[in-house]
Each structure stands twice: as structure tokens, then as C-alpha cells.
Amino acid sequence: MEGRSFGLDVLRTFSIWMVMLSHVAYWYNPSSMGIYYSGIKPLLLGVEPFFVLGGFLAALSFQQVLVKKGGRIYTGDAVVYIKRRWLRTFPNYFLFLLIYSIAFSLTKPDFEFDVKYLFFTQNFYWLAPSFFSVSWSLATQEWFYIALPLLMVAASQSLPERFHVNPMLAGSLALVVISFVARYHYMHINPVTDLEGALRRIALLRLDSVGIGVFMGYCYFRWTRWLEANSLTLFLVGILAVVILSYLRRNDVFNQLYWVQMLFYPIFSVMIALWMPWLYKLPPFSSNMLVWLFENTSKWSYSIYLSHVFFLDGIYLVGRKLGIIFEPGFLILGLSITWVLATYVASATIYRFYEKPWLKYGKRDKKAEVKLPQKSGF
């Protein structure tokens, strides 16, 4: 569990590349009737794999504790896990929250900071403002980091041992139920017209996607041999289903169906979860260069996610002031390459000198029972 999973590094890398590609597209002014919107954009899954992956890796972490402590999770285990997650995510989040606040203050005279961002409640049961746009998914993850271990502790303490209910199973199913009920209630008091916006970006409505990743982790340890023996088949079925659902998501009639709105993202997440057993055991490629690229992009993915929009908008604003017309061509291609390089260099630097010291600090707790994989979630 302590070593890296190359396949999960590959998934994390492709996921962050999809996020970057979807955001840089506006530089190229793609036609709404062209191949980008009809053929490419539906397959840019954005942060959806990150949610499932975060849950799967949480299951890998807690499995060690369950084995060591007779199938139970205690309050101390939950505290250690939450502390480790906060040390992993808080420093970068608040660094970029400060950077975005300064940038908005300098460029938007009417900007007022919303204190909800300090407590990750900007999209708890409502849509977040346009400020620090990428933070909606981080807030969802943060609430998961709190909810899962507490639910597992509650299951360990309230369910009699004779029932033999795995706290990981109980916690993951509880997250699915919480989101289902929240989505049902939200849709009855708010107009919802499609699968974007609220249904995708509100934290309480998306905890089930991360919970499904936990459930797949539970299944992996429960039926390891069967899942590993059939992992490639499950992966291919999951890929096919995700492609079909991704194109259906762009259909207006499909979007407006009530049960589609209720069940689309849980089903979508289950299909992504089918990728995990095969990717988890995927061996490294023979090319050292590709291995280096995937492993390091994976390490830097959190900083890439937080910084790429900042550099994207910064280059765009400067370019417009210089009279650059953002349309397809060698100039925009050159600016795109510059943007990627700037994002990568900044992210690598932040990881080396800012993230890693915090990670090392978190590992100093000698009494910690929860040992996280080298890379967990973002």
C-alpha cells in the first residue's frame, strides 16, 4: 500500500490533462457546431475520475487499520486521517485562495471576499460564486474527508460485532444515501434543467461519487481474486459505458429526465469505479520518460489543478491588452505551450518547496495508525 500505483498515476495524469484541455478551449473560439463541442468536449470528464479515485485511495488507507484493529475504526484513527488530509490539502488551497483574492482585488473593483471559502462551504448546498472557480471540487473532497471517517467510527461503535458489518461498507453506503436524499430535496425546491450546474457542483449532491470509490475499494478487498481476474473486462465495460453516458449527457432531452438527473452521476461514478482494479495493478511502461512524466504529473496534479486557470486567465488578459486575437494559429499554439510550461514549472516548484515539507510534517506523527498511499486524491 505504501508504494505508488503506476496505473492510478496514469489516471490522475489524464484527468488533469482533460481538465486543462477543457479550460484552454476558449482561447481557440471553437464553433458550437464544430467537432470540439460535438466530439471532443463530451469526453473531457473533468474532475469526475478524481472523485472516484479519492474514495478508492481512502479505502486503501483504511483497510490497513481495519485489518490491524479487528475490523473497527476508532476516533483516533479518524482524527489521524483527517489531520493527514488537511495537511495535504489546506496549505495549497489557502495559498491559492490568497493569490486569487489579490488578483480579483486588483482586477475587479467591486470584488468582495466571501468568508464561506475559508470553511469550504461556498458550494455546500448551493452553487458557489464565480470566484476561485476550481474550488468547488476541492470543497466536495474536504467534506468527504470529514464525513467518511466519522461515519466509519459511528458504524464501528453502534453496530454490534455479531453483525460483522464492515465500517467501510457502512460509510460508503451512507454517503450514497446522504447525497441521494440531498439531491431529491434540492430538486424539489429548486428548478433543475440539466446535468450541469447544481447537480454537478454542489458538495452534498456529489459525496456519493466519492463514496462509490470507497465502495469499490471495499469490494476490491472483499473479492480480490475475482476482480483481478476480470479487471480488464470490467475496465473495458466501464470505458464503453462512460463514453456512451458522456455523449448522452450532452443531449437536451436526456438531461431533462427526472430520473436521469437523480441517478446519472452515481451511475457514471460506478462506471469509472470499474476502472480501478485494472489500473491499480497496471505495471509501469517500458519507457522511463513516460514513467517520469506520469509519476511527476501525478505528484504535481494538485498544484496544476489550482494554478492552471490562474495562468490561463493571466496570459489571456495580458494578450488581449497587447492586441492578440485569440483564434486558432501558431501564435495561440505558442501561447498554449507557454501556458503549459508555466503551469508545470510553477506546480513542480510549489510541490518541491511548499507541499512536500507539509507532507513530511504530517508523517512525523509516530502514533499515526492510518498510513496513506504516497498519493491520495488530489
Image: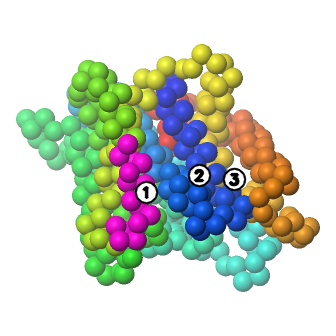
Q: Nearer the viewer, residue 284 or 175?
A: 284
Q: What's the residue at 66%, 59% (across, down)?
A: 25
Select label 2 or label 3 by which is in front: 2
Q: Is residue 130 visible?
A: yes
Q: What's the residue at 16%, 47% (across, down)?
A: 158
Height in image: 219 above or below 175? Answer: above
Lateral position of residue 197 relative to residue 208, left or right: right
Give the residues in magenta: 240-255
Q: Which mark is residue 111?
A: none
Horizontal and vertical percent position of residue 29 = 70, 65
Q: Which residue is identified by label 1?
A: 247
Select label 1 or label 3 by which is in front: 1
Horizontal and vertical percent position of residue 162 = 7, 35
Q: Is residue 187 magenta?
A: no
Would you identify the image quadrant in which residue 81 lies?
Answer: top left
Question: Residue flagged by tag 3: what amino acid is it?
Answer: His
Q: Marks 1 and 3, how far apart in space?
A: 26 Å
Q: Is residue 251 magenta?
A: yes
Q: Which mark is residue 19?
A: 2
Determine the secondary structure under disc 1.
helix
Circles 2 and 3 in contact, beta carbons < 8 Å: yes
Height in image: 350 above or below 370? Answer: below
Lateral position of residue 182 relative to residue 317, left or right: left
Would you identify the image quadrant in which residue 79 lies?
Answer: top left
Q: What's the residue at 43%, 57% (across, down)?
A: 247
Q: Marks 2 and 1, how far apart in space?
A: 17 Å
Circles 1 and 3 in contact, beta carbons < 8 Å: no
Q: Is residue 207 visible?
A: no
Q: Which residue is identified by label 3?
A: 308
